[in-house]
Image (spheres, rainbow, N blue to C red):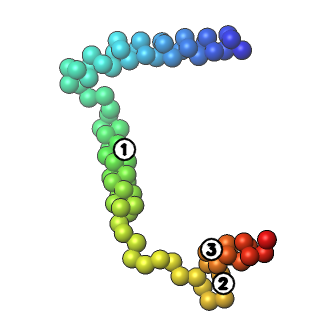
């Protein structure tokens, strides 16, 4: 088990070293890290995240109404607590 953990740590260290030697200097020089397709994917993900954030922040117009003949969650909880 210890050998597996050590191998994982070695791989993680190797990945960090590759990033430090290749990606960071390239980014500092202003070179793009993603291809044109990658930039499109990131842009669409940002748009979807913004749309989801706006949906979450929008106020709810009215509370949900139970269908006729069905109890709401609050009514169900009250009836269950009355039983015992």
Please tell me whether mark 1 or mark 3 is closer to you in this view: 3
Whichever of labels 1 and 3 marks the residue nearer the N terminus, that label is 1
Residue 81, how many percent across, how many down? Answer: 72, 72
Q: Is residue 41 left or right of residue 29?
A: right
Distance from Cα at disc 2 to Cα at disc 1 = 45 Å
2 vs 3, front mark: 3
Q: Earlier in the sequence, mark 2 or mark 1?
A: 1
Across the whole image, how many numbered discs are drawn on residues? 3
Q: Is residue 25 above or below residue 50?
A: above
Depth check, front residue: 35 or 80: 80
For label 1, the residue is 41
Mark 2, Cα crowd under 10 Å, few <14 / some 14-19 / many 20+, is few
Residues at discs 2 and 3 in contact (Cβ within 8 Å): no
Residue under pointer 3? 73
- Identify the element where label 3 is drawn: helix
Q: Which mark is residue 70?
A: 2
């Amino acid at each position: 088990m210890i050998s597996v953990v050590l191998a994982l740590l070695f791989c993680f260290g190797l990945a960090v070293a590759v990033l430090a030697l290749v990606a960071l200097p390239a980014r500092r020089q202003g070179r793009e890290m993603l291809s044109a397709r990658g930039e499109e994917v990131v842009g669409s993900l940002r748009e979807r995240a913004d749309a989801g954030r706006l949906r979450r922040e929008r106020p709810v117009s009215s509370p949900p109404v139970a269908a006729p003949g069905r109890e709401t969650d609050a009514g169900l909880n009250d009836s269950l607590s009355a039983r015992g």
